[in-house]
């Protein structure tokens, strides 16, 4: 419990520092959004002043940031320069990205750990070689190449999946994009599981368990695998945030109306409030996931729990 | 001793020679593109040949502007190699300094460095890079390098710090200290050489990841811009036409994948060679 509190105390300043950094980066961008609103027409000084005051653009950056974070904790992400609330803009889009990231994550978790165990149990065997070669290849091919190839071959030519859009809902429309998005992480999870399992299978406690007469299934499943999953859990925790943020490319290829597409458009249109809103929420998810992972360690490995107490 | 063992192990691996050969060719292409390409970048383009497939005299066909695609793809090598290597070298230097200082001295310095690392670790890569790059539209290859260093130094720093903490309490460090070695000598002569091996491995893997990341930003249209030539830019253009003109996608993707793959495989075999536990 003390450990949990300590971790939380560390996470809070990190959260504020990261979000402030993003805030400063976005709003320190050259270019005046109020002038941009008017296009090529000249803007009268008074209008400029009124608009700047209305959006608090005339205050110091730190004050603006403080005002903004106060709003965020009340569920108010601010509004765009055209007056639309950011939270309204993102409402439908969050669910698309969350479904996509979740599909990818489940895919990574199930298939990745499965392949890793398959390879790790028979190190040097045919399955092991195939998994190692396959995962290295998947890591090396850029995700947009994987995406387009999958879309053409599996979607268009073979007709196994819908090629674009969200018409079929979950899971139909999200299976192929989820697999593409999760392919990179899947390769990492498989390799981590394999390496970790190989090391643990040689440990003394596994030999002891075998010598006690436990079945192979029990030795591997309960003793070796549980310890081997610690680095894998770390990776999966960090990766959920990455998946949400990395969805930009996948959403573009499969035309999914998620936050990735929205935020990318907003960056190019200099819609600062949307960018900051999305990235702030992403950072929050990322830090919470990391925190959850740290607390999960203790559940998986009692040694860590005691050492830290 | 370790280095000689590792070399003996490496020498026997086919994968090592294969990836080293691919990387040598890629480095040569980056340094002397004229040796491989008939034409300069964006030279002698003929719009009439736009998107034509491979034919006699044009092994890879023509790109959207009707330029010889083989020459264009060869010239694209430099951007990827320069960014990949430069970003990794700078990130490695940062991680060595911060890792040594944080891990060796501990206390306030360590806490501060660790928290700053956490802050940068929490920024999403694609979105963070896009925000900065859009703010400075006239960026060239070195601005790209700076942005990628800014977002990419954290993993190696964490690893380096962990390594330093593990090594600094070993007997040989205590012995050197008793012989009167100062902090700086301890750090650079005794701790660093014994702590750096895993960091070097991660750095090699990192070159591949940075190259892929740079290509992703180019592909999204926020990275390098015409008239620069890079594989990511070629893939950016290919996305609109690849269904009917697959050669536009296939060739830069092939070069990109081969280069990234070679760095990853090299990192893998070097790790195996340095880590006798897995033998």
Image (cartoon, rainbow, N blue to C red):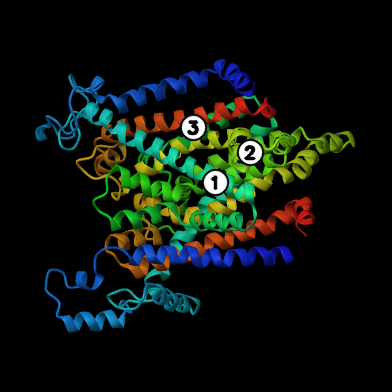
Subunit of label 3: B
**Left or right side of A140 for A49:** left
The residue positioned 17% from the left and 34% from the top of the image is B42
Front residue of this view, candidates A83 and A95: A83
- B246 in relation to B128, above or below: above
The residue positioned 63% from the left and 60% from the top of the image is A292
Q: On the image, numbered disc 2 is attached to which residue?
A: B186
Kindly state the secondary structure of the residue where label 1 is placed. Answer: helix
Q: Position of residue A86 (x, y in %)?
A: 37, 73
**Left or right side of A96 for A9:** right
Question: Any mark on residue B264, and which?
Answer: 3
Using a 10 Å C-alpha cutoff, classify the residue at mark 3 as few (fewer than 14 neighbours), some (14 to 19) or many (20 or more).
Answer: many
Distance between mark 2 and mark 3 Cα atoms: 32 Å
Subunit of label 2: B
Distance between mark 3 and mark 1 Cα atoms: 20 Å
Q: On the image, numbered disc 1 is attached to which residue?
A: B157
Question: Any mark on residue A255, and which?
Answer: none
Distance between mark 2 and mark 1 Cα atoms: 19 Å
Subunit of label 1: B
Front residue of this view, candidates B230 and B159: B159
Using a 10 Å C-alpha cutoff, classify the residue at mark 2 as few (fewer than 14 neighbours), some (14 to 19) or many (20 or more).
Answer: some
Residues at marks 2 and 3 on the same chain:
yes
- B74 in relation to A240, above or below: above
Front residue of this view, candidates B28 and B127: B28
Nearer-N-terminus badge (3/1): 1
């Amino acid at each position: 419990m003390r450990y949990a509190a300590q971790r939380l105390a560390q996470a809070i300043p990190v959260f504020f520092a990261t979000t402030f950094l993003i805030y400063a980066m976005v709003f320190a961008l050259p270019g005046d959004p109020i002038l941009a609103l008017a296009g090529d027409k000249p803007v009268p000084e008074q209008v400029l002043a009124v608009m700047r005051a209305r959006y608090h653009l005339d205050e110091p950056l730190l004050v603006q940031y403080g005002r903004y974070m106060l709003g965020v904790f009340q569920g108010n992400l601010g509004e765009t320069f055209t007056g639309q609330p950011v939270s309204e803009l993102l409402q439908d889009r969050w669910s698309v990205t969350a479904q996509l990231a979740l599909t990818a994550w489940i895919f990574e978790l199930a298939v990745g750990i499965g392949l890793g165990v398959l390879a790790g149990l028979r190190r040097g065997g045919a399955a092991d070689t195939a998994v190692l070669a396959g995962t290295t290849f998947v890591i090396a091919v850029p995700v947009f190449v994987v995406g387009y190839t999958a879309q053409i071959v599996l979607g268009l030519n073979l007709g196994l999946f819908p090629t674009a859009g969200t018409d079929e809902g979950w899971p139909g429309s999200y299976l192929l994009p989820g697999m593409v998005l999760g392919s990179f992480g899947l390769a990492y999870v498989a390799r981590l599981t394999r390496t970790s399992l190989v090391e643990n299978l040689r440990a003394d406690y596994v030999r002891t368990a075998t010598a006690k007469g436990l079945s192979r299934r029990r030795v591997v499943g309960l003793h070796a695998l549980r310890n081997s999953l610690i680095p894998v859990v770390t990776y999966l925790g960090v990766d959920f945030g990455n998946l949400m943020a990395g969805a930009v490319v996948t959403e573009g290829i499969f035309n999914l109306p998620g936050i990735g597409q929205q935020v990318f458009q907003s960056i190019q249109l200099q819609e600062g409030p949307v960018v900051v809103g999305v990235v702030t929420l992403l950072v929050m998810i990322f830090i919470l996931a990391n925190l959850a992972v740290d607390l999960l360690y203790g559940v998986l490995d009692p040694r860590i729990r005691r050492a830290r107490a | 001793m370790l280095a000689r063992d590792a070399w003996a192990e490496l020498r026997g691996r086919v994968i090592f020679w294969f990836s080293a050969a691919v990387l040598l060719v890629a480095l040569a292409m980056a340094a002397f593109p004229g040796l491989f390409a008939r034409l300069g970048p964006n030279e002698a383009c003929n719009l009439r040949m736009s998107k034509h497939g491979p034919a006699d005299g044009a092994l890879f066909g023509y790109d959207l502007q009707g330029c010889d695609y083989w020459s264009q793809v060869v010239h694209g090598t430099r951007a990827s190699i320069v960014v990949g290597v430069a970003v990794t070298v700078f990130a490695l230097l940062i991680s060595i300094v911060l890792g040594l200082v944080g891990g060796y001295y501990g206390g306030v310095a360590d806490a501060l460095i660790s928290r700053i690392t956490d802050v940068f670790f929490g920024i999403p890569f694609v979105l963070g890079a896009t925000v900065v790059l859009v703010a400075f539209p006239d960026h060239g290859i070195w601005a790209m390098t700076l942005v990628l260093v800014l977002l990419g130094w954290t993993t190696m720093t964490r690893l380096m710090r962990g390594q330093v903490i593990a090594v600094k309490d070993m007997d040989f460090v205590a012995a050197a200290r008793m012989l009167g070695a100062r902090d700086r000598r301890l750090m650079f002569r005794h701790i660093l050489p014994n702590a750096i091996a895993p960091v070097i491995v991660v750095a090699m893997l990192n070159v591949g990841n940075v190259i892929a990341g740079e290509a992703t930003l180019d592909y999204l249209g926020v990275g390098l811009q015409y008239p620069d030539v890079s594989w990511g830019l070629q893939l950016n253009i290919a996305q609109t036409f690849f269904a009917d003109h697959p050669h536009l996608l296939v060739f830069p993707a092939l070069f990109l994948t081969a280069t990234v793959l070679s760095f990853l495989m090299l990192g893998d075999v070097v790790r195996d060679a340095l880590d006798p536990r897995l033998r």
